[in-house]
Amino acid sequence: MSLAVIALNQILVMFLIMVLGFLCFKLKIINHETNKKLSDFLLLIVNPLLIFNSYQRDFNKELFQGLLVSFVLALVSHIVAIGIAQLLVRGKANKDLPLERFSCIYSNCGFMGIPLINSLYGSEGVFYLTAYMTVFNLLIWTHGVIMMTGQRSIKAMFKTLISPTFIAIVIGFALFLLDIRVPEVLYRSMDYVASMNTPLAMIIAGVTLAQSEIKKVLFKRRIYLVILMKQILIPAVLVLLYYRLPLNPEIITTAVLAAGCPVAATGMLFALRYHKNHLYASELYSISTMAALVTIPAVMLFAGLFIR
């Protein structure tokens, strides 16, 4: 089965879970306030545990070298995305411009990337993906928060660096380097909670989408501009930038797919948290997730032409 077909199957599964969230709101099982609490739980508890557990594996020199390469590719990928967003996503009078640029830069590399990469490359691919997730989280809690809040003070940045996600990254990476594993009972407990990551994110997306007027959403041209930049242009540029490098194709493809995932669910969660236009954020997230049914298989087909 080709990578494009495997990716399409996984996206269909996630889309059906999003439909469940949509129905839960319409049937009054989940309301706006409950959704806000679920968002906080996902952002502050589930996501950090997911990242921490991804580092819980035996130290291996080859894996470590691959991880370092993945870190470099992840950093370059984000720099490219930031540059493209700044150059091509414009609008002086657009109050949602920071949210649109945020959406172009930051991808759903954890919520969607993990199950996709796991279905393509297994646990080793997910391990390399943790490098992208680490860079993503370091930037999203610094550069991303600054974009959303407009605060550039050292104090504001320091607050983000003591977030649960950042702490999980530091402790998890340190334990991997020291080859230390937490007790099995503790690991399994955290793993059960971390496994809620994808379904909970998709339910939240569905609930939030249910609060918007879908017919109007489908005709918002700015959403399609973001999708074009985020899910087509940026991964295509990265494929052309990376494919000649003498690296493991699995590492390159993982970096490209992570960058080409739909708009980050964190943008929707941050919009709720920092009192931004959370409905527009959910529209960007939901429509880009639906568009991924086409864009991710297309990116995989394009990548397959160059990365071998």
Image (cartoon, helix red, strand yellow):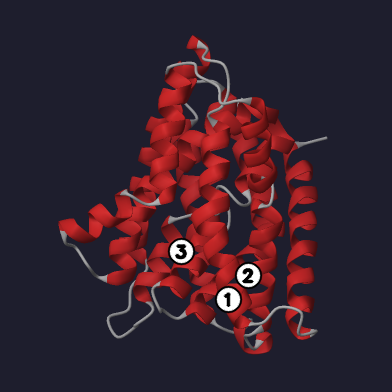
The foreground one among 149 and 155 is 155
List x then y, in percent, for residue 21. Answer: 74, 71
Kind of residue sitting beneath label 3: Ser
- Residue 26: x and y, percent? 76, 85
- In the image, what residue occupies the spot 70% across and 29% down? 122
Q: Are marks 1 and 2 in contact (CB under 8 Å)?
A: yes
Q: Which residue has dot 2 on it?
A: 286
Q: Residues within 10 Å of mark 2 (few under 14, many from 20)?
A: many
Instruction: Give the label on residue 77, or none.
Output: none
Residue at image location 67% in from the left, 60% down from the top: 200
Is label 1 in a helix, a strand or a loop? helix
Task: Please tell me whether mark 2 sits on a helix, a strand or a loop.
Answer: helix
Q: Residue at x 51, y 15 (%)?
A: 59
Tell which of 223 and 39 is nearer to you: 39
Location of residue 216 by image quarter: bottom right
Instruction: Give whichever of 152, 71 is nearer the camera.
Output: 152
Which quadrant does the C terminus fall into?
Answer: top right
Mark 1 or mark 3: which comes first in sequence? Answer: 3
**CA distance separating discs 1 and 2:** 5 Å
Q: Looking at the image, can residue 83 be seen? A: no
Horizontal and vertical percent position of residue 230? 50, 58
State the separation of the CA atoms marked 3 and 2.
Answer: 12 Å
Which mark sits nearer the N-terminus, 3 or 2? 3
Number of numbered discs overlaid on the protein picture: 3
Is residue 164 or residue 119 the one in the foreground?
164
Q: Are marks 1 and 3 in contact (CB under 8 Å)?
A: no
Residue hosting label 3? 103
Residue that numbered label 1 is attached to: 283
Rendered residue at 62%/33% (across/down)? 186
The percent position of residue 15, horizontal first and vertical second, equals 75, 62
Mark 2 belongs to which amino acid?
Ser
